Image (spheres, rainbow, N blue to C red):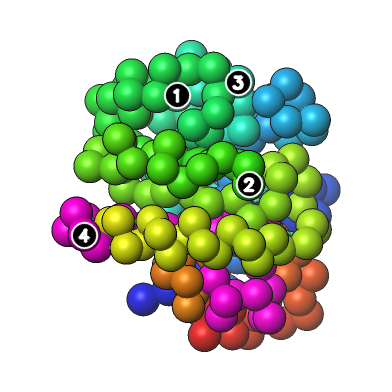
Amino acid sequence: MIKIAPSILSCDFSKIGEEVERIDKCGADYIHIDVMDGHFVPNITFGAPVVKCFRKCTDKVFDCHLMISDPLKYAEDFAKAGADIINFHVESDSPVQETIDKILSLGCKAGLTVKPKTPIEEVYPYLDKLSMVLVMTVEPGFGGQKFMADMMEKVSKLRAKADEMGLDLEIQVDGGIGLETAPVAIKAGADVLVAGSAVFGAEDTAGMISALRG
Ligand code: DX5
Ligand code: ZN
């Protein structure tokens, strides 16, 4: 079953609470929350206090994508704010294993994310503790960028590795997902699709979410 995780980065920030409620009602599986610190990526979004406010709007799974330099330092804040899955970058400054252990000790699921230039093999040593690996299909920082089809090789390799290890791993893709690219990612082995502009730019939000699922 393919899951759709709309990224609220592309929603109308003047009514963000209503937007979170709306995508919940329109059939989103996860709510993808892009946290950027202006240091790890050249953009700033929001922190844990804001995520805590979203928590009042829905019971849906919060998939927090931390594009921040020190996820170990802030993991607890996001867990307390209501995150269910905490994804952080293997390229961050925090020690990877320690950060995963911290996230798990907080009762959240751990996800590890790779930027386009990072080889997928970098996540292999941690796979048995992870619920999800997020393969970026754009350079992190902004919505509305073009899907990098050459990332699909990483997705297929990872799916084969997870199958070989007998793991029930979710593989998420993030960036440039729309009606044309979703089937490409699904074919490669992705089962959680983040979509920002495709979902929030659609007139029929529920129709788009269901169409992306294929
Ligand atoms: C980019 C973010 C993405 C982004 C996706 O750094 O991680 O989640 O919002 O937006 P679209 O779907 O518009 O590429
Ligand atoms: Zn994201």
Lower position in the chain sequence, tag 2 or tag 3: 3
Q: Residue at x 59, y 85 (%)?
A: 211
Q: Is residue 89 placed above or below 69 in the rendered structure?
A: below
Dot 2: element: loop
State how far apart marks 4 and 2 are (Cα).
Answer: 24 Å
* Residue type (three-letter) at the residue carrying disc 4: Glu
Q: Which mark is residue 69?
A: 3
Question: Residue 172 in magenta?
Answer: yes
Dot 4: element: helix
Q: Nearer the viewer, residue 149 or 180?
A: 149
Q: Residues within 10 Å of mark 3 (few under 14, many from 20)?
A: many
Q: Residues within 10 Å of mark 4 (few under 14, many from 20)?
A: few
* Residue type (three-letter) at the residue carrying disc 1: Ala
Front position among marks 3 and 1: 3
Q: Position of residue 67 (x, y in %)?
A: 62, 33
State how far apart marks 3 and 4 are (Cα).
Answer: 32 Å
State how far apart marks 2 and 3 are (Cα).
Answer: 17 Å
Q: Residue at x 80, y 30 (%)?
A: 42
Q: Residues within 10 Å of mark 1 (few under 14, many from 20)?
A: many
Q: Residue at x 64, y 56 (%)?
A: 137
The residue that label 4 is drawn on is 164
Look at the image and tell me whether residue 42 can be seen: yes
Question: Residue 18 in magenta?
Answer: no
The residue that label 2 is drawn on is 116
